Image: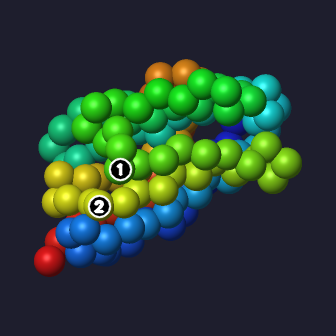
């Protein structure tokens, strides 16, 4: 059974940074492309970043390109998302998902709030 557990969310001010983590189990993480998606209150799921299994290919949505960085530790089965230069528009629940440009299966999410 695929299990994805996100952590690292919280309240930050505009311009600050945060690092999210996703602990994966129940599948061969090192052989799987992975993604981050987010959902703001009242809006649909938004794909924001993906990384292939070996990390050789990385994709970002234009809304986060240059500010967010996806990375992974295949030895520990952990996916990361470094968020920098955050704005209020980045406020959302962030999920990791198994697959390339995928929104499911995904974890329970971690809430990120950007507010002054």
The residue indicated by pointer 1 is: 67
Check disc 2: other Cα within 10 Å, few if <14, some if 14-19, many if 20+. Answer: some
Proximity of marks 2 and 1: CB atoms separated by less than 8 Å? yes
Give x and y (percent) for residue 74. Answer: 79, 43
Relative to residue 66, is residue 109 drawn left or right? right
Q: Is residue 14 visible?
A: yes
Q: Is residue 98 visible?
A: no
Give x and y (percent) for residue 54. Answer: 74, 30
Going by the picture, which residue comes out furthest to the front? 66
Give x and y (percent) for residue 42. Answer: 16, 43
Give x and y (percent) for residue 35. Answer: 52, 34
- Residue at horizontal 18%, vertical 38%? 43
Going by the picture, which residue comes out furthest to the right? 75
- Residue at horizontal 20%, vertical 59%? 87
The residue indicated by pointer 2 is: 85
Secondary structure of the residue carrying tag 2 is loop
- Residue at horizontal 45%, vertical 35%? 49
Secondary structure of the residue carrying tag 1 is loop
State the quadrant of the N terminus.
Answer: top right
Check disc 1: other Cα within 10 Å, few if <14, some if 14-19, many if 20+. Answer: some
- Residue at horizontal 58%, vertical 57%? 21
| Closest to the observer, 108 or 112 | 112
């Amino acid at each position: 059974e695929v299990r994805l557990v996100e952590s690292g969310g919280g309240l930050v001010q505009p311009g600050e940074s945060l690092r999210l983590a996703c602990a994966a189990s129940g599948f061969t993480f090192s052989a799987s492309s992975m993604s981050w998606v987010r959902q703001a209150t009242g809006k649909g799921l938004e794909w924001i970043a993906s990384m292939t299994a070996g990390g050789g290919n990385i994709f970002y949505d234009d809304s986060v390109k240059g500010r967010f960085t996806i990375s992974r530790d295949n030895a520990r089965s952990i996916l990361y998302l470094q968020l920098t230069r955050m704005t209020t528009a980045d406020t959302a629940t962030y999920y990791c998902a198994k697959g390339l440009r995928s929104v499911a299966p995904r974890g329970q999410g971690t809430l990120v709030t950007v507010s002054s």
